[in-house]
């Protein structure tokens, strides 16, 4: 995710990069977003791998710490504020985020669990690196509390409000195999799917 307006505005988007095809099907390739100078490629909707439910991380070891570092490198390279492991085809419960204006407060959440959510709901415009150039309004809890393990395997609790609350709920949805467009009407989802598939096919013909 990437803040399009001020952090307090609750309007969040993902920045888009050119489509490069990957992972061949019989007659069509689902594209991935290749982020320059980063380790990991980002899956693009409607790639079915985005609907995989992530498994809990059994132990925070060197492999998981490297995954966290790679996710952060990818997120910063894409000028994002949040990224889930699911989006890079790693189906474990790991997300990273940094919603600070100074871009120097990275947070890793391993096996995150929502422990509290406010009754107050807010509507914010969202987008997704996995769904480029598509933005729409989604209603979410205005503030939430999340328990998780950090990069060192230590348990902590985070109280998120504003952009951080939007971001953590958005990224935790990815771990459940849910993309934000699934909050939209069936008609909108069909239009988005058709648009992105056409764009991907057009990009493949140009290659």
Image: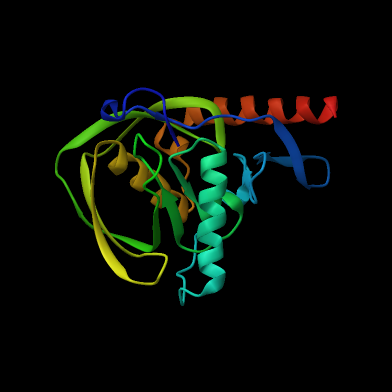
Residue 207 visible in this rendered orientation of the protein? yes
Residue 176 visible in this rendered orientation of the protein? no
Q: Where's the C terminus, which quadrant? A: top right
Q: Position of residue 70 (x, y in %)?
A: 57, 55
Above/below status of 147 relative to 6: below
Viewer-closest of 153 and 118: 153
Above/below status of 98 relative to 123: below
Q: Which residue is drawn at 69% across and 25% down?
A: 199
Viewer-closest of 183 and 155: 155
Horizontal side of residue 97 vs 37, given as left or right: left
Q: Where's the N terminus, which quadrant? A: top left
Q: Residue at x 83, y 46 (%)?
A: 26
Q: Position of residue 173 (x, y in %)?
A: 41, 49
Image quadrant assignment for residue 166:
top left
- The total of numbered circles placed on residues is 0
Viewer-closest of 96 and 93: 96
Horizontal side of residue 161 vs 197, given as left or right: left
Q: Where is residue 9 in the image (x, y as percent from the top left)?
A: 28, 25
Q: Where is residue 197 in the image (x, y as percent from the top left)?
A: 68, 31
Q: Which residue is drawn at 32% across and 24% down?
A: 6
Q: Residue at x 70, y 26 (%)?
A: 198
- How are the colours assigned in the image? rainbow
Above/below status of 149 relative to 146: below
Image quadrant assignment for residue 193:
top right
């Amino acid at each position: 995710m990437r803040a399009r307006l001020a952090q307090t505005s609750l309007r969040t988007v993902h920045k888009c990069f050119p489509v490069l095809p990957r992972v061949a099907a019989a007659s069509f390739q689902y594209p991935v977003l290749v982020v320059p100078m980063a380790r990991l490629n980002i899956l693009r909707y409607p790639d079915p791998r985005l609907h995989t439910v992530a498994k809990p991380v059994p132990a925070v070891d060197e492999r998981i710490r490297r995954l966290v570092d790679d996710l952060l490198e990818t997120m910063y390279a894409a000028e994002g504020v949040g990224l889930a492991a699911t989006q890079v085809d790693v189906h474990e419960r790991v997300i990273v985020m940094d919603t600070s204006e100074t871009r120097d407060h990275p947070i890793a959440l391993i096996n995150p669990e929502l422990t509290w959510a406010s009754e107050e709901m807010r509507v914010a415009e969202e987008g997704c690196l996995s769904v480029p150039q598509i933005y729409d309004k989604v209603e979410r809890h205005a503030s939430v509390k999340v328990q998780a393990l950090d990069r060192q395997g230590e348990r902590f609790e985070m109280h998120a409000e504003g952009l951080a609350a939007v971001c953590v709920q958005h990224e935790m949805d990815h771990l459940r195999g849910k993309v934000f467009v699934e909050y939209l009407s069936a008609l909108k989802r069909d239009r988005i799917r058709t648009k992105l598939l056409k764009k991907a096919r057009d990009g493949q013909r140009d290659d």
